[in-house]
Amino acid sequence: MQLRYTILYVENVAATLAFYEAAFGVKRRMLHESGDYGDLDTGATLLAFSSLALMEKLGKSPARPQPGRPVFEIAFETADVAAAFAHAVAAGAVPVQPPEAMPWGQTTAYVTDPNGFLVEICTPVAPPA
């Protein structure tokens, strides 16, 4: 088994793809002609989005994110967290926590996307020796 993609349920797939392209510099891989599904080229595991409307048509009852009570996060690694944080906020991300050095040697910052999903911007973490 291989983790191939993570799918988040959103109101507007095209707008969400455009936000991630602008805020984090990731490339769109595809947007289905229906507008109900699209994904980003984020390496071996894709970040994908499906419309809430499609999920409801398929008999699902998707919940909307609660920014003050996240249950997971998306993380993007970068060498310059401060610059990436500023860029994301300029592109419409909502700041949650500015860049901060962690005791384990990583720098992290947090924003939410326009849908309310928590996004971490961080430096890489070296695995223990």
Image (tube, grey):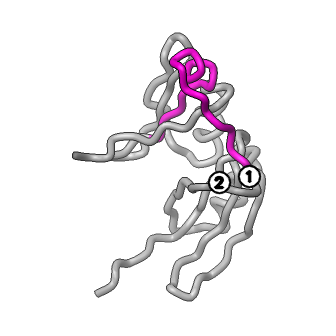
> Is 57 placed above or below 55 here?
above
Q: Secondary structure at mark 2?
A: strand
In the rendered image, which quarter is residue 15 located in? top right
Residue sitting at 55 percent across and 26 percent down? Answer: 60
In the rendered image, which quarter is residue 54 located in? top right
| Left or right of 114 on screen, residue 31 | left
Front in this rendered view, residue 5 or 31 = 5
* Amino acid found under the numbered disc labelled 1: Pro
The residue indicated by pointer 1 is 67
| Left or right of 71 on screen, residue 79 | left
| Left or right of 76 on screen, residue 18 | right
Range shown magenta: 47-67
Residue sitting at 54 percent across and 53 percent down? Answer: 74
Residue sitting at 62 percent across and 82 percent down? Answer: 101
Residue 41, position in %: x, y?
Answer: 42, 39
Question: Residue 118 has which mark?
Answer: 2
Residue 45, position in %: x, y?
Answer: 37, 45
* Amino acid found under the numbered disc labelled 2: Leu
Residue furthest toward the left? 1
Q: Earlier in the sequence, mark 1 or mark 2?
A: 1
Front in this rendered view, residue 86 or 117 = 117
